[in-house]
């Protein structure tokens, strides 16, 4: 049974050409076999294309309205334009999302103007204390600078760029293409001048027409206190020079930090350990410890247990941007047990253990530690 073309496109019989085109475009995207793999989608797409072929032509539409398909003379036809393949279907998407303009459109090209230079990356590894307190570093950067000979124009002194003959200075070339929706014009960058609209016929001998040359410069970089591994510093205008008078790019410095033999860092906190003798743990006393600021006298309280954490407030890492605010330094106490003692030392420890046992009747506290040490060396 013959299918009504207006019903196929879901338009009324008095629909305008624009309404018909809009309806077909929507349905074609939905039922094209490249995107719709359901059974019958390809046949339905062919019916839609046939309906659009007839209704988009004023003469064929008038004959169809008066006589139906019998008035078309050729019966069921093919897809418009001798076929509607995958390449044509991609043109539909391009017409929606760019790259094409409607026939007669006045979309104009634009010559390639000033372009900003590329950003550069430099990896810099710091010592632990350089990161804590900041420092000044001198680094060598290889980057592109504006050619002094041609002052960035890329042309030999006394000459200049000329208008591209391929695109006549527009920077673009256009190719007309007929689709089921009408004639569309594909716009692309000119392959001769790469979209600039100009070509250099007499290039500068120094930069070979590029307008930039590579040079290695030494620059000084200030590292602020408190930076951490993975932080990134930006140095403005130390990247590559721009083209056609464009601004320079920036230099980004990515920081790494070497491990320290004593300190471990987590954020703004510093961690380390201190080893004390068992007698210092029992009796207490002062010991010297290292901090990021230098030696510090640490008080060990009598009866300090192994694994005790002592906090030094404000002795950690400065905060970036506010170095007066610092984290803390956490020190873990490790008690060293001797592997050998003299006979006199052992006798003294055993005597102390007996005294404590007689007083308490049980082994606990400091006496328990001493007794355990004595037992360790017996036998």
Image: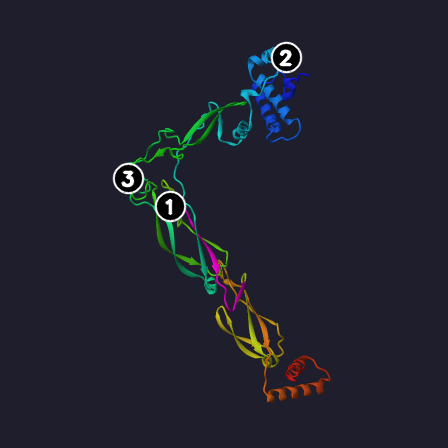
- Secondary structure beneath label 3: loop
Where is 195 relative to 80, above or below? below
First in sequence, mark 2 or 3: give its number.
2
Residue 63 at x, y = what percent? 59, 11
Res. 68 mark: 2
User: Which image quarter: residue 168?
Assistant: top left
Residue 250, magenta (yes or no): yes
Residue 260 left/right relative to 159: right
Q: Is residue 65 left or right of residue 152?
A: right
In the displayed structure, 152 sits above or below 369; it is above
- Which of the two discs, 3 and 1, labels the residue nearer the N terminus? 3
- Residue 149 in which image quadrant: top left
Which segment did they paint magenta? 249-265
Q: Are marks 1 and 2 in contact (CB under 8 Å)?
A: no
Q: Residue at x 53, y 32 (%)?
A: 97
Identify the image quadrant of the C terminus: bottom right
Instruction: Choose mark 1 or mark 2, whichever is in front.
Output: 2
Q: CA distance from mark 3 to mark 1?
A: 19 Å
Element class at badge 1: loop
Report which residue position mark 1 lands on: 241
Q: Give the class, few, some or many, for how many residues have Cα within 10 Å of label 3's Cα (few <14, many ≥20).
A: many
Q: Which residue is mark 3?
A: 156
- For the residues labelled 2 and 3, the Cα–Cα distance comes to 71 Å
Asked whether the residues under the numbered discs 3 and 1 touch, taking CB atoms below 8 Å apart as contact, a structural biologist would say no
């Amino acid at each position: 049974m013959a299918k009504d073309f207006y019903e196929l496109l879901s338009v009324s019989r008095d629909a305008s050409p624009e309404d018909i085109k809009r309806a077909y475009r929507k349905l074609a995207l939905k039922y094209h076999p490249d995107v719709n793999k359901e059974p019958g989608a390809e046949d339905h797409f062919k019916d839609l294309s046939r309906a659009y072929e007839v209704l988009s032509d004023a003469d064929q539409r008038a004959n169809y309205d008066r006589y139906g398909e019998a008035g078309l003379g050729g019966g069921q036809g093919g897809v418009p334009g001798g076929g509607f393949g995958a390449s044509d279907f991609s043109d539909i998407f391009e017409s929606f999302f760019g790259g094409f303009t409607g026939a007669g459109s006045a979309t104009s090209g634009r010559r390639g103007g000033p372009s900003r230079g590329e950003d550069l990356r430099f990896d810099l590894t710091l010592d632990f204390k350089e990161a804590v307190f900041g420092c000044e570093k001198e680094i060598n950067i290889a980057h592109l600078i504006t050619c002094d000979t041609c002052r960035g124009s890329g042309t030999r002194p006394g000459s200049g760029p000329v208008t591209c003959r391929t695109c006549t200075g527009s920077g673009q070339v256009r190719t007309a293409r007929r689709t089921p929706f009408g004639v569309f014009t594909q716009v692309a960058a000119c392959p001769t001048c790469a979209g600039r609209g100009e070509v250099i016929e007499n290039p500068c001998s120094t930069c070979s027409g590029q307008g930039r040359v590579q040079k290695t410069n030494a620059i000084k970089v200030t590292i602020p206190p408190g930076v951490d591994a993975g932080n990134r510093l930006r140095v403005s205008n130390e990247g590559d020079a721009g083209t056609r008078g464009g601004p320079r790019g920036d230099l980004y410095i990515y920081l790494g930090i070497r491990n320290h033999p004593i300190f471990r860092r987590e954020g703004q906190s510093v961690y380390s350990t201190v080893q004390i003798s068992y007698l210092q743990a029992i009796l207490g006393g002062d010991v010297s410890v290292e901090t990021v600021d230098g030696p510090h006298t640490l008080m060990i309280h009598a009866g300090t247990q192994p694994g005790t954490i002592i906090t030094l407030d404000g002795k950690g890492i400065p905060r970036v941007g506010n170095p007066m605010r610092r984290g803390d330094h956490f020190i873990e106490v490790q008690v060293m047990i001797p592997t050998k003692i003299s006979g006199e030392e052992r006798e003294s420890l055993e005597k102390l253990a007996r005294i404590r046992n007689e007083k308490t009747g049980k082994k606990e506290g400091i006496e328990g530690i001493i007794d355990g040490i004595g037992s360790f060396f017996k036998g």
